[in-house]
Amino acid sequence: MRRPRGRPTSGRRPVRPAHEAARFVAAVAVAVFRGGRVLAMRRSPLKDAGAGAWEALAGRVRPGEQPLAAARREAREECGLEVAIDPRPVASYQAKRNLEDMVMVVYRGASKAGDVVLSDEHDAFAWMTLAEFARACPFPLLVEAVRLASEAGGRRAPRAREVKAT
């Protein structure tokens, strides 16, 4: 016997047609460390979301792309550095990008040498201490994720952590 769509059954959530289902932007961030500092990027004033905000390397996951592959691509595209990325995420959280719901997966990376080459997405960069990054970045969940990435250091984190708003 088929159940009608949209009707709850035995405590389960109702089944919704695909066009009504919640949609999320999938995104990744990479906290890149060098010499005890994290790479902070200032978003171009021309960006549609977060213009002028300091952040870690970040970007959307393309359709069919794995999050780790997206993290590697974003690192290449946004800073031009060779970044060694730990394949195990250090944190994840849900946020808003303009009016869209976004799920962010955060990785830890390290870059031993090289010069940052800015893309058109950013107009400045700085190697910041965690305290400087916490003061400059307007996104508290990203600040917490970068702190967790810093704690992970060169060792593997026991598991990815969900960062929650307080």
Image (cartoon, rainbow, N blue to C red):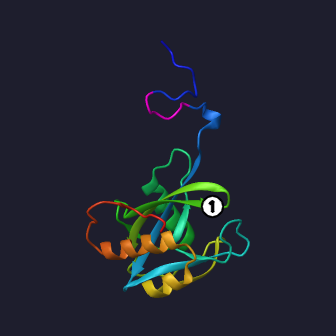
Q: Who is closer to the viewer here, 126 or 146? A: 146
Q: Which residues are magenta?
A: 10-15
Quarter location, residue 148: bottom left
Q: Which residue is drawn at the image coordinates 37% and 85% (left, top)?
A: 36
Quarter location, residue 16: top right
10 Å crowding of disc 1: few (<14), some (14-19), many (20+)? some
Residue 100 percent coordinates (x, y): 64, 54
Residue 129 can be seen, yes or no:
no
Q: Which residue is drawn at the image coordinates 40% and 63% (left, top)?
A: 91
Residue 161 percent coordinates (x, y): 36, 62
Residue 92 percent coordinates (x, y): 43, 60
On screen, residue 73 above or below 15: below
Q: Who is closer to the viewer here, 87 or 102? A: 102
Does the segment drawn in magenta span residue 14?
A: yes
Q: Who is closer to the viewer here, 9 or 128? A: 9
Residue 112 percent coordinates (x, y): 38, 80
Q: Which residue is mark 1?
A: 97
Q: Who is closer to the viewer here, 139 or 80? A: 139
Q: Main secondary structure of the magenta part?
A: loop
Amino acid type of disc 1? Arg
Quarter location, residue 77: bottom right
Q: Would residue 80 appear left or right of 17 to someone viewing this image?
A: left
Does the segment drawn in magenta span residue 27?
A: no
